[in-house]
Image: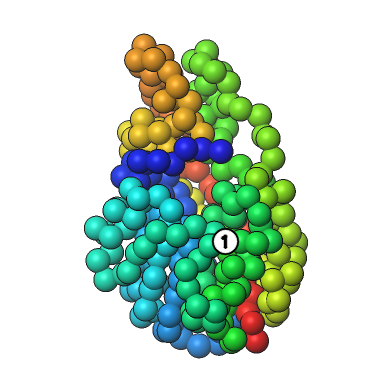
Amino acid sequence: MAEWSGTGRAYAESFARLCAGAVPPLLDAVESVRGAPAGGRLLDVGTGPGTVAGAASARGYAVVGVDPEGSMLAVARRRHPDVHFSAAALPDLPFEDGWFDVVTASFVLGHVADLQAAVAALARVCTGDGVVALTSWPSGRSPLRPLWEEVLARGGAVGYPPDSGPRGGGAERSAEGLADLLADAGLGRIRTGTLTWTFEIDPDDLWRGVAGGVATIGGIHRSLDDEGRRALRAVYDEVAGTRADSDGMLRVPHSAILAVGTRR
């Protein structure tokens, strides 16, 4: 698993922008299932720099965001001062049963040890007529991984680690698996779907995440000495240059699984 300690600012300026493409359709799906406009109490679990939380607040929700990583919370508080953020991690959510009308966990389940316990915790804090909404990568692999694999292969650095399997067993990697997790937690009216968007970023901005130690590629970067890091950056610039559009921007199509369920 990636080491996230101290990566809040680097993540917010790079990889968080990748995940942001799933936020509007996630909240749209919540409102569709609720059959009501935005409003009520919303808990965003694994909030990171607060992307979902901020978007939900802008729609009119009273939002609480939780994350176990202090640097993520610092960025979230600075960016979204109208949202309450606190430290917490699944499955130990410090809230009363049935407190929130909506509970979201976007790209979070791949980082938990016990999927069933995590989703049960999300359902526990949701009201009797509330909604739980999840997103996840369909294979457990970000579409950016081929870029990193090419960079590492050409740069002669340590190879990208093989898939060791997700901590929770992999149920979050398919629509059916997410639906089963929601059903096992006592939720119904379950809907699943696929979200698609194009991630657009300047290559220099994306590298800030790597240099800041974000995700697996950032961990590899941390493990290198200064010479190795300089060499990896040079190869990255070459590879990114071949993949960038004529305006110099990287554009990578992405997709994610969405699953939404209600306690009604």
Residue 224 seen by the camera:
yes
**Which residue is at a point 61% across and 61% down the rendered structure image?**
118
Frontmost residue, 98 versus 29: 98
Residue 206 placement (x, y as % from top left): 38, 37
Residue 223 placement (x, y as % from top left): 45, 22
Residue 245 seen by the camera:
no
Residue 80 placement (x, y as % from top left): 28, 64
Residue receiving disc 1? 91
**Which residue is at a point 75% across and 61% down the rendered structure image?**
176
- Quadrant location of the C terminus in the rendered image: bottom right
Instruction: Classify 10 Å Cα crowding around label 1: few (below 14), some (14-19), many (20 and above).
Output: some
**Which residue is at a point 36% across and 11% down the rendered structure image?**
227
Frontmost residue, 87 versus 172: 87
Frontmost residue, 220 versus 118: 118
Vertical relation: 52 (above or below) 228: below
Task: Give the amino acid at mark 1.
Answer: Pro
Vertical relation: 90 (above or below) 30: above
Q: In this view, does 59 lie to the left or right of 101?
A: left
**Which residue is at a point 52% across and 21% down the rendered structure image?**
152
Residue 236 lies in quadrant: top left
Vertical relation: 69 (above or below) 264: above
Vertical relation: 224 (above or below) 9: above
Query: How does the figure colour the protein chain or chains?
Result: rainbow
Residue 188 lies in quadrant: bottom right
* Secondary structure of residue under mark 1: loop
Count of marks placed on residues: 1
- Quadrant location of the N terminus in the rendered image: top right
Residue 151 placement (x, y as % from top left): 50, 23
Frontmost residue, 247 versus 128: 128
